[in-house]
Image: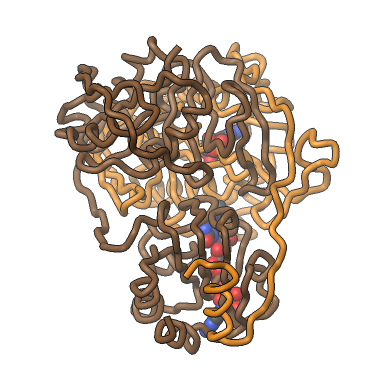
Chain colours: A orange, B brown
Amino acid sequence: MKVLVPVKRVVDFNVKIRVKPDNSGVDLANVKMAINPFDEISVEAAVRLKEAGQATEVVAVSIGPAKAEETLRSALAMGADRAILIETDDTVEPLAVAKILKCVADTEKPGLIIVGKQAIDDDSNQTGQMLAALLGWAQATFASKIELGDQKAAVTREVDGGLQTIEVKLPAVVTTDLRLNEPRYASLPNIMKAKKKPIEKRIAADLGVATAPRLKVLKTEEPATRKAGIKVTSVGELIEKLRSEAGVL
Amino acid sequence: MAILLLAEHDNRTLSDQTARALTAAREIGSEIHVLVAGKDANAAAGEAAKLAGVSKVLLADSDALANNLAEPLAALIVSIAGGYDTIIAAATASAKNVMPRVAALLDVAQVSEIIAVVSPDTFKRPIYAGNAIQTVQTTDAKKVITVRAAAFQPSDAGGSVAIEAVQAAADPGLSSFVKDAISSSDRPELTSAKIVISGGRALGSSEKFKEVILPVAEKLGAAVGASRAAVDAGYAPNDWQVGQTGKVVAPQLYIACGISGAIQHLAGMKDSKFIVAINKDADAPIFQVADYGLVADLFDVLPEFEKAL
Ligand SMILES: Cc1cc2nc3c(=O)[nH]c(=O)nc-3n(C[C@H](O)[C@H](O)[C@H](O)COP(=O)(O)OP(=O)(O)OC[C@H]3O[C@@H](n4cnc5c(N)ncnc54)[C@H](O)[C@@H]3O)c2cc1C
Ligand SMILES: Nc1ncnc2c1ncn2[C@@H]1O[C@H](COP(=O)(O)O)[C@@H](O)[C@H]1O
C-alpha cells in the first residue's frame, strides 16, 4: 500500500512573527522556514508503516513556492521515497489545497493519506477533512494511534473529553495529532541520500483546478497586547491581591 | 436567509459552547435554527429550545449520529444546507472534524475559529498562534464558520421554541465507532470554567500533578489544564492541553504553575481576565503576560496556597 503525505512549508514554530506596519500581512522576509510540525509527525507515521512492512512506498507532496523543495527534502531525509512539488507563488487556501491533493491522489492511488491536523501558520485545521470529502473517503482526524488492518484501520482520536477510537475503511484520510509519535532526526547520511531522491515538479496552474481564494483578507493586525503586571513576594500577598484587587476569589 | 447552528452535546446535555456560538450567530442574523444531531438527544434539544434568540430546533435521531462520526453527520448537514446561507458551530473537536467536510461538499471555504463578527460576511480570526489577527471577508454564497467559544459570552436561556424532527441522511458507512475513553470528573469543564489552574513540565509526574494541582483546583472549584509538555510526558490527559493546538480558554482567573509560557501555550490562555504565574525562573516568558507573578518553587507554594484559601 502506498501512503501519501502532504507537507507544508511554514514559518518555524520558534519564530515570533511580526505583522507588517501597514497591516497588509505578516512579514515573512528572512524568516526561518520549516516543515509544519504536524507534517513531520505524518512523515514519521508513514515511514514507520513502511518499516513495519505495512506500507510499500511513502510519497511526500507539497504545494507552494519553488523553495518548498527544501521541505520535501526534509521529508525525504526522514525516509519518504519520493516527492511531488506542485509549484505556485499564490496563497492557496485549504479548499484549493484539498482539490490539488485530490488530483494527486487520483493519479497516485494511495491506500492512506496522512495529513497534519493543522498548519501552524493559518491555523485552519481543514485540509484533511476537505480532502476526505472530495475523495468520498472516510476520515479519522486528530489521531494519536493508527493500527492498520485488512482494508481498514483502527484510529484513536484526541477529542474534547478524552479519546475516541473509530474504525475506517481504507482508503482513508487520517490527520495527525501531537501524541502520535516523536519524529526522528534525519541522520547526515540520510540527508545526503535524500538529495538524490526524485522530486517530480508540476505547475499548479496546469492541473486545471480552480484555486482562486474565496476569502478576501482585508487586514492583518497585531493582537491586543497584555502588559506584564507585578511580582508578588508571598502566597499571602498573592491571595490578598486576588481578593481585593482582582476580585476573583 | 436563515442560519444553521450545529449544537455540541453528549446526547444528554447541551454544551455551554453552543450558547456561546449562538451569540456569534446572533451577530450575523436573526433567524437561527439549532441542529441537534444524535441518538436519543431529546434532552439536549430541549435545552437548545430554551436559548434566547433561537427560532427553531431541528432534532435528527439515528444510530449513525450517536458518536459524532464525520461522514453521516456531514451528509445530514449537507442534506438540509439548501435552506441556509450560514452554517456555524463552536470550534469543538467534533465541529472541527465535521465542518470542513461540510464546506468541501458544498464547495465553499470555511472560516475557522472566528473571534469577532465584523459584518455578516466579515470576521476576525487569529493566525500564527494568535500572534496576528486577520479580518477576512467571504465571497462564497454559503458561509461555513467555526467560532472560538472563549471569545463570546453565552446567550442566556429565555425562549421556548418548537422542536422539529428531521430525517437523518443515509449513512455512507465509511467508518464505525469502536469505543470512547472519556474522562468524567466533577470539576467544571475547561472551556467554560471561571477559574483554571494549569500545570507544566515542572510537575514531573502524574502523581505529583494530582498531589499538588488537584487540591487547589478542588478548593477553588477550578478546571484543570496542562501544557503540552505535561501532556506529552503523561502527567495529564490530552484533553487538558491548553494552547494553539489544544483548548482555548478565557477564564476570570488562570493560574499557570511550572509553565514557561511558550507562544503555543499563550495562544490558549492569554485572553484570560487575570493571569497568575508561579515559576522558579524569574525570566520565564510567562511573567510577561502575568498580572501577578510569584517567583517560587511550586512544590512549596501550592500547598501553602491551598491551605490559605
Ligand atoms: C506544533 C506545536 C504545537 C504546540 N501546541 C502546544 C499547545 O497547544 N499547548 C502547549 O502548552 N504547548 C504547545 N506546544 C509546545 C510548546 O512549544 C512548549 O514546548 C510547551 O508549552 C512547554 O511546556 P512547559 O511550559 O510545561 O515546559 P517548559 O518549557 O519546560 O517549562 C517548564 C517551566 O517550569 C519551571 N519550573 C521547573 N521546576 C519548577 C518548580 N519546582 N517550581 C516552579 N517552576 C518550575 C521552569 O522554570 C520552566 O519555566 C506546541 C509545540 C509545537 C511545535
Ligand atoms: N500547501 C500545502 N502543501 C501541502 N500540504 C498542505 C498544504 N497546506 C496544508 N497542507 C496539509 O494540510 C494540513 C492542515 O493544514 P490547514 O488545513 O491549513 O491547517 C497540513 O498539516 C498539511 O498536511
The picture places residue B44, in percent across and down from the top left corner, at 23, 37
Q: Residue at x 51, y 64 (%)?
A: B253
Residue under the point 31% across and 63% down: B187
Say left or right for B195 vs A245: left
Q: Position of residue B288 (x, y in %)?
A: 69, 67
Quarter of the image holding residue B186? bottom left
Q: Nearer the viewer, residue A238 or B225?
A: A238
> Would residue B2 be found to the left or right of residue A17 on screen?
left
Please, is residue B210 above or below residue A139 in the view?
A: below
Q: As displayed, is residue A216 above or below residue A4? A: above
The residue positioned 60% from the left and 11% from the top of the image is: A208
Closer to the camera in the image, B244 or A133: B244
Extreme right residue here? A21
Ligand 2 image position (quadrant): top right
Q: Is residue A219 left or right of residue A96?
A: right
Q: Quadrant of the N terminus of chain B?
A: top left
Relative to A200, does residue B268 appear above or below in the rendering? Answer: below
Question: Which of the 4 image quarters holds residue B2?
Answer: top left
Residue B124 visible from this viewpoint: yes
> In terms of image quadrants, where is residue A129?
top left
Q: Is residue A162 above or below residue B152?
A: below
Quadrant occupied by the C terminus of chain B: bottom left
Decide if residue A82 is in sight here: no
Q: Position of residue B207 (x, y in %)?
A: 34, 79
